[in-house]
């Protein structure tokens, strides 16, 4: 817990202007102004020569925030806290921030909600074969024997493999509880007992991939997770199984996935890719067994207001002298997104 400020702290927006405009409409700015002194019209997109930085006690950051390195911090003597109105802080919070002892908060938990919702929808649709049936119905425009075309389709007692008990991974597990699904988990940082407490069974990655009807990726982008789904592991997937990736594009070997998808043996729902935008000629855009979306699982549109509300709650806590509810701890960053 930090000392309660005797006066209202100065705050500064440090993010892309379009993000500030989308995330802090007039009602949010009015609430914010009851806690801090801030110029709501001013957004610092470049901190190299930012006069307002000298008096700022709180930086309100989001996508597009400049890197907060030693040079920036040297010009911010009053800075004590960073409230990040987005997910990962790895892109802008540097070692210098931790050395300075700054309090850091993130809205990663709020941003995890729509990602998990997208993922659960993808899982349920995949097992029900909704996209396949919809395409066939569109072509034939007449009733067909769906059970003959898709034997065993449906969600009852299907197996879902969750890779990574991250914020999103745990939210997916929570949202899947009402369904009659068997959920497996692969995560080296989660014990068998902890997995059981989450309501899932911990297994090794290869067992998870080979046993699951849907494999859903929720691990961070780390050297040890690079191309987690490579050619060898993709080949372990059951015929007709579905790969869902809403985590990081680097978790999947794009070339290997393309080869498997071209064979028609597996299906995929892919929201993040490596590279971030695939070349225009990639077969993944048009294959009938692949649903490719442009990194939309996270907070967009009206969902941004959940992040805004969470950031405002954190600022309220700070101004009341209370600890952040969603504090980011330096030690945890090594194994998180």
Image (cartoon, rainbow, N blue to C red):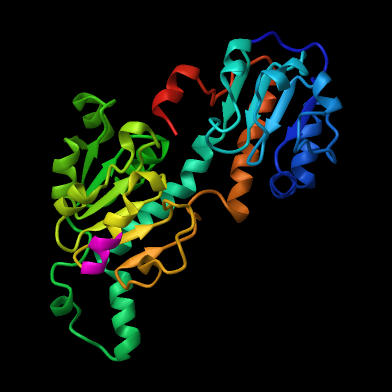
Range of residues picked out in magenta: 258-263
131 shown above or below 258: below
Q: Is residue 276 magenta?
A: no
Direction top: furthest residue: 3
18 shown above or below 269: above
Q: Is residue 324 visible?
A: yes
Image quadrant containing the N terminus: top right
Horizontal arrangement in the rendering, residue 232 relative to residue 80 (left or right): left
The percent position of residue 258, horizontal first and vertical second, equals: 30, 61
Q: Quadrant of residue 152?
A: bottom left
Q: Quadrant of residue 7?
A: top right
Q: Is residue 261 magenta?
A: yes
Residue drawn at (41%, 63%), measured in percent from left and top?
292
The percent position of residue 41, horizontal first and vertical second, equals: 85, 41
Viewer-nearest residue: 98 or 157: 98
The percent position of residue 133, horizontal first and vertical second, equals: 28, 76
Viewer-nearest residue: 37 or 269: 269
Q: Is residue 158 visible?
A: no
Residue drawn at (67%, 18%), measured in percent from left and top?
70
Judged by its main secondary structure, the magenta piece is helix
The percent position of residue 231, horizontal first and vertical second, equals: 22, 51
Residue drawn at (69%, 26%), measured in percent from left and top?
316
Horizontal arrangement in the rendering, residue 11 relative to residue 94 (left or right): right
Image quadrant containing the C terminus: top left
Tally the numbered discs.
0
């Amino acid at each position: 817990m930090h000392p309660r400020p005797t006066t209202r702290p100065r705050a500064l927006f440090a993010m892309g202007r379009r993000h500030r405009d989308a995330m802090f409409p007039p009602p949010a700015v009015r609430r914010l102004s009851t806690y801090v002194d801030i110029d709501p019209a001013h957004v610092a997109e470049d901190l190299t020569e930012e006069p307002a930085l000298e008096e700022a006690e709180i930086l309100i950051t989001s996508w597009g925030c400049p890197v907060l390195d030693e040079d920036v911090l040297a010009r911010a003597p009053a800075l004590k806290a960073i409230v990040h109105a987005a997910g990962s802080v790895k892109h802008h919070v540097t070692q210098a921030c931790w050395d300075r002892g700054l309090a850091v908060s993130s809205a990663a938990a709020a941003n995890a909600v729509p990602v998990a919702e997208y993922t659960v929808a993808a899982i349920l649709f995949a097992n029900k074969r909704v996209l396949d049936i919809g395409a066939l119905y569109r072509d034939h425009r007449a009733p067909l024997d769906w059970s003959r075309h898709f034997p065993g389709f449906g969600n009852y007692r299907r197996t879902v493999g969750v890779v990574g008990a991250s914020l999103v991974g745990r939210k997916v597990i929570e949202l899947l509880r009402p369904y009659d699904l068997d959920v497996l988990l692969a995560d080296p940082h989660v014990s068998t007992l902890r997995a059981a407490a989450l309501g899932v069974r911990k297994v090794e990655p290869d067992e998870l991939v080979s046993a699951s009807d849907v494999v859903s990726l929720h691990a961070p982008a780390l050297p040890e997770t690079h191309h987690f789904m490579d050619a060898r592991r993709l080949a372990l997937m059951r015929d007709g199984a579905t790969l869902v990736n809403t985590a990081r594009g680097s978790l999947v070997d794009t070339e290997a996935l393309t080869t498997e998808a071209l064979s028609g043996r597996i299906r995929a729902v892919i929201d993040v890719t490596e590279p971030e935008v695939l070349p225009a000629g990639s077969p993944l855009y048009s294959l009938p067994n692949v649903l490719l979306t442009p990194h939309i699982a996270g907070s967009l549109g009206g969902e941004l207001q959940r992040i805004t509300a969470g950031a405002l709650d954190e600022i309220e806590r700070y101004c009341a002298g209370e600890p952040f509810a969603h504090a980011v701890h330096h030690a945890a960053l090594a194994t998180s997104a």
